[in-house]
Structures are given as C-alpha cells and as structure tokens.
Image (spheres, rainbow, N blue to C red):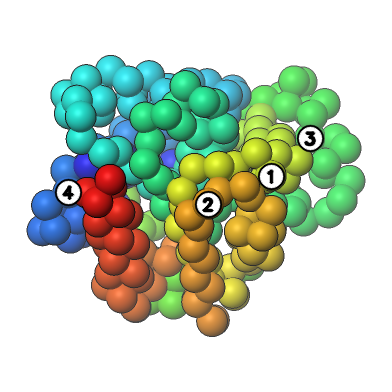
Amino acid sequence: MVDLADNQLVCCSGRYNHFAKLLNDHGLKVYAMDWIGHGGSDGVHGYVSSLDHAVGDLKEFLEDVVLEENYGLPCFLFGHSTGGAIVLKAVLDPCVEVHVEGVILTSPAIHVQPSHPIIKVVAPIFSVLAPKYRVAALHRRGPPVSRDPEALKIKYADPLVYTGPIRVRTGNEILRISSYLQRNLSRVTVPFLVLHGTADTITDPGASQRLYQSSASAHKSIKLYDGYLHDLLFEPERDDIANDIINWLSSRLDVLQRW
C-alpha cells in the first residue's frame, strides 16, 4: 500500500494517475490526497496558511483512511517537492513513523532558495500583513520543470494546477518547513528512497544528498539523475524512474516478508 500524497506546490494528485496504475499493476494499493488550497481541495487556490496544517491533514488521512481500511498491510508514503517536505516532517513524529515502513521522496523541498536573500527577511512580515498576495519574486524562476514539452502542455492546461505567482504566506511556509528540515535531518530514521534531478532549480539536489548523508536511517537509498529537471515522474524517462521506485518498494517488501 502506498499513500500517494502529491503535494507539489502547483500540483494536484490526479496528475499521478499513470504512476498509480503502474503501482496497481504490481499489486500495490494507492491512496492520494491534495493539501488545502491545492488540486481539488477546498480553500483559496495556491494558498496554505500553515504547512503544519498540511502535515496534520496527512496524519489524519493516514490514520482515518489508509490504515483503518488496510489494517496489517505495510504502508509507504510518497511525496514530491513540497509534498516530500510534508511527508518528511510527518515521519519525524514517532506516532506516524511506527505505522510507516518507508518513504519515497522525489525532488523534496528540503532546501528552497528565494530569488533574493532579502526575501527571507521580509517574507515572515508580509505573510502576516498580506498572506494571500501573489509575488513572483518569492519563487526562483528557472527552466521548465520537465524536458517533455507534451507533459508541460498537459500540466499547465489542467485547471486544478495553480500556475500563478506564489502567494506570500505559502512561500514563507515553504521556506519555514525547509529550514526546519535542514535542522533536523539527523533525526530521520525511517527507511527512505530519495530521487532528484541534478538540473533541478526549484529544489536543491544537494539537500537530498545531505539528507542521505546526515540521516540516522539504517536503510536509505539515493538516486541522482544527471541533467533531469524537477518533475521526475513527468520527464521523458518517467517509466524508468517509476521502475526504480517500484524496485525499491519490492526490495523493502521482500525484507519485511523475511522477518
């Protein structure tokens, strides 16, 4: 079983139907959620007042939907980009970690840099004064998030995908959760697989390497894809990346079955 929590900043979980079907084909049940203000969830589009609320929603979703309906089955969490940060913070809670056999993180937002250092100073202030205001400068602009033009076309044509400038409070919350994770990487003990493209300019592949090096996890793996961009599961090599994830899940399930 995999809780497929696609919590990317501008995304919705429906984009991952292809990946979910691949997991289904390998006997894995998949659940998905959108965090508040994103995808099909309630709230102002692109706005989240606190990512701690998103972490809490993930915990509640895990307890009330996933575990209750699948008692006794091993559970893995998947998170992309900001969703990776949410998943990682959630499993730092021992009450969550005890129910999770492992996590898969693609392009996790462990280290996110704004376009100018002053943003880190003023963002907390303006997130209180004008939390829903949209400011492009809060988010570094780089090349496209995928090297597949068709994938980009589909993404930005989806009405559930937020394409506007980042909202002040949302941007500050991403900076805040990434700062928290950087200070707590050594506390991560859950088995994990982290995947990152080396050409990603949205989130930092070096931070994924620091997670791998600093965490206390006994079972951890990292894979860096040379020249790949941010949306790994929408790159031209998406099926190869999905297979890397499926192979890791299979290896973890084999270990559990031997216990």
Q: Earlier in the sequence, mark 2 or mark 4?
A: 4
Q: Which mark is residue 218?
A: 2
How many neighbours does mark 4 have within 10 angstroms: few (below 14), some (14-19), or many (20 or more)? Answer: some
Q: Is residue 233 left or right of residue 188?
A: left
Q: Which numbered disc, 1 or 3, marks the residue closer to the eye?
A: 1
Residue carrying label 4: 28
Residue type at the position of mark 4: Leu
Q: Mark 3 against mark 2, which lies toward the viewer?
A: 2
Q: CA distance from mark 4 to mark 3?
A: 41 Å
Closest to the camera, between mark 2 and mark 1, is 2
Residue 186: give its label: 1
Residue 188 is situated, as x and y percent measured from the top left of the image, at 59, 42
Viewer-nearest of discs 2 and 4? 2
Q: Residue at x 62, y 28 (%)?
A: 132
The image shows residue 199 at horizontal and vertical percentages of 59, 75
From the viewer's perspective, tell me whether residue 179 is left or right of residue 44: right
The quarter of the rendered structure image containing the C terminus is top left
